[in-house]
Every structure is written in C-alpha cells, then in structure tokens.
Amino acid sequence: MKVFVVNAGSSSLKYQLLDMRTETVLATGLVERIGEAIGRVTHKRFPDTEAEEKTVFDEAVTDHKMAMHRVIDLITAPDTGVIAEKAEIDAIGHRVVQGGEVFNRSIIIDTAVKEAVRANNPLAPLHNPANLVGIEVAEALFNGTPNVAVFDTEFHQTMPARAFLYALPYRYYKELRIRRYGYHGTSHKYVAGQAARLMDRKPESTNLITVHLGNGCSMAAVAGGRCMDTSMGMTPLAGLMMGTRSGDIDPAIIAYIAHQQGLGVREIDDLLNKESGLKGICGANDMRDIHARADRGDDMARQALEMFAYRVKKYIGAYVAVLGRVDAVVFTAGIGENDDVIRAMICQDLDGLGIRLDEEKNRTRGGARPIHAADSRVALWVIPTNEELQIARDTVTAVSTSAPTG
Ligand code: ADP
C-alpha cells in the first residue's frame, strides 16, 4: 500500500510518499513560497544512492493546486519519480492541526468531516484553513483515492477533565470550547509506541514522559499508551519555553503589558508567539546558535539555556506526580534528539526521582538509543520522531477500519 502524506501550511506544502508494506520512504519534499513571485520546490527520491535532492526556484507557484500539480509531476516523472502514475497511490494522509473534541482518531474525510474541521477553524486560525485547502486540492486531483485526516490533537483526547479544563467560568468551555487540546500528538504517539517496543514492554503497562523539543516544544504524560496530560494548551503557546514562544506565563502579564504599553491583543499575541521564548531572552531562537553564543561567553545565551532546561525539568517533576510511576523519559525532535548538553542540564540532579543519565551514552549520536545509567530507576531514551510515518500508519488504519459516512 502506497500512502501519500500531505502537510499543507498557509504558503507551503510538505509531502512524503511511503510504501507501507515495508514502511519505507519513496520520496519526500517541500513546496515553499506558494503565492509569492518565485516559489521553491525541493524534492528527494529514494533509494538513489546519492539521495539526490532537486531544488527548483523558477516560477511562481500561484496556489496549492499548482503546488500539488508540481509534486505529482515530480513523483511521476521518469527522472525524478518513484511511481508511474498517481493512481498507484492508495491513500492520502493529511496532517490536520486542530480536531477539537470531535476527533479522537484519524478518519476518512467526507463532507461531514470537512465541515467539522472547518468548525474548528477559530481554534486554529493559522493552520486548519490551510490544512483544508490541502484536502480539497487532493480531493480534486486524486479522484476517488481516500483522503484521511490525522489530527495533531487526537492523541491528547484521552486526557481527563481535571487535566484539560481551565479554571475559568465553566461556560467558557461549553460555549467557546476553551480547554487544553495539546499538539504534536503524532510525535508523542510515535515515540511512545517506539519506546514501548524498544524496551520490549507492553504499551498498555508502560508509563512514559515524552519530551518533544524542536522549534515548538511540548511534553506529554502517557500512561499505558494514553495521554494523561500535556504541556501545550488550547493553543501551542502554552507550556515549555520554545524558540520564539513564551510558554507558560502569568496570564495577568497580558493585561499589564496592554495597560503599560498601550498594546492591543493582536500585538501581544505576536509578542508572545514570535518575539518571546529563547529569542526573547537572548535574541536567537536556533539552539545551535545559542550554544555557539554561550560558548563565546554570552551571558544571555547561557541564561536562555538554563531557563529552557529548567522548564523541562519542572514538567518532568510534575508528570512524575501525574503518572505515579514512570518507566521512561523519551527525548525527541531537533533539540531532544541532538542536543546532549540540554539533555544533561535537564537530567541534572534528578536522582531523587530515580533519573540518572549516563554522560557517555548521552554524548553518542545516531538513531534510537538508551542514555540512562545502569542504576537509573527510570529509563532515558533518545528516539527520533517520525510524524510522517505515524500519519501514514494512522492513514492505513483508518482506511482499513472505517468507511466514509457522507
Ligand atoms: P520543528 O519544530 O520546526 O520540526 P525541529 O524538530 O527540526 O523543529 O527542531 C529545530 C530545533 O532543533 C532548532 O532549535 C535547532 O537549532 C535544533 N537543533 C537541530 N540540530 C541540533 C543540534 N545538532 N544541536 C542542537 N540543536 C539542534
């Protein structure tokens, strides 16, 4: 079965074509700057030994439909392609950011599903509309091929009300659907599944803290394969300190800034999402740059690193309390997978929680690997995330278990 995974953003279209019999990637790529004067298309096919990558900057990619046409051309053309015709694709899996409370699993897309996704647009105004465009373009260009929606929020739908409700007047939950939804669900689900497998344990009896540290950062407390709590909230702004997002702050700060500086809600929203986090503290949001600055003696870069690691450590403590017993802490995404310094800072002095890092193992590079000391009560793992593979798996499951309703 060949599954085409699509992640449509407001001006981009990311794709991956996988052969699910072997779970191998056949081709992957990205169309960027959709709607701008000159677009950019990056495409890579496997298993060419050189894993040749083709980048084309040539003409405007006016809209997502044109972007999808370009991608179909690339994956079917003799010199760049991996299939002879698009009809070889058995299903299309779409990343959809916000599934609200309606979707706790991936589902074949029909009119009712699209309506429900659209109804969630106010909760994710930057993402869901773009995801819907991707769906509609795929429906138009892949006539009759099932399209499946895989939601970033679905893994977190198992959270109990005590974890997902905010202590606001209850009517805000009922009327405006204000609650914790959580994001990065496919990543947390993927690494949680991998961790149980790698530890040779049953997922149903494994308790995990999954730590996704990329540009966006989030954590989840996972008991027996079910999410019990997560750090992102109604939006991805909550929780950990991120590249440019503040994570948790005292909510009264917003009114204070508005009052002191005469800023409107939009401007404050931008401030918290785009100018805060690591960037707000030290001026840089790429972790590699921050380390380079800290190594050169930049005190604010060092401060940012300390704050970043401290916030993760605090959430580990909180999630140990949520779960009662923790079998493993799993680090993933750009920083979680690659940054041994941050992992060491996070795990420092956690002996009281049964967490002990092996410094040498922590410095190793490569794929999935344990990094805990022999006497650590809690296992520590680095597991590379693979959201596309999880989307493709969930697409296969949806296609093989459900039928469209409308
Ligand atoms: P996204 O959330 O956009 O998918 P990624 O998971 O790719 O992001 O993570 C991006 C972050 O990972 C950036 O802060 C980047 O600096 C960091 N990163 C990538 N490689 C390394 C590395 N070798 N060491 C430290 N940080 C890294």
Image (cartoon, grey):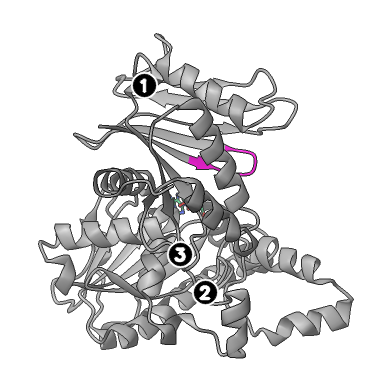
Using a 10 Å C-alpha cutoff, classify the residue at mark 2 as few (fewer than 14 neighbours), some (14 to 19) or many (20 or more): many
The answer to whether 129 is drawn above or below residue 152 in the figure is above
Can residue 341 be seen at all in this image of the molecule?
no
Instruction: Determine the residue positioned at 86% across, 82% down.
Output: 260
Near-viewer residue (358 or 259): 259
Instruction: Determine the residue positioned at 62% across, 78% down.
Output: 175
Query: Which residue is labeled 3 in the image?
Result: 102
Q: What residue type is labelled 3?
A: Val
Q: Which of marks 2 and 3 is nearer the N terminus?
A: 3
Q: How many marks?
A: 3
The answer to whether 279 is drawn above or below residue 48 in the figure is below
Q: Quadrant of the N terminus?
A: top left
Of tags 2 and 3, the one toward the viewer is: 3
Magenta stretch secondary structure, dominant: loop
Instruction: Determine the residue positioned at 46% across, 67% down.
Output: 218
The answer to whether 406 is drawn above or below residue 66 in the figure is below
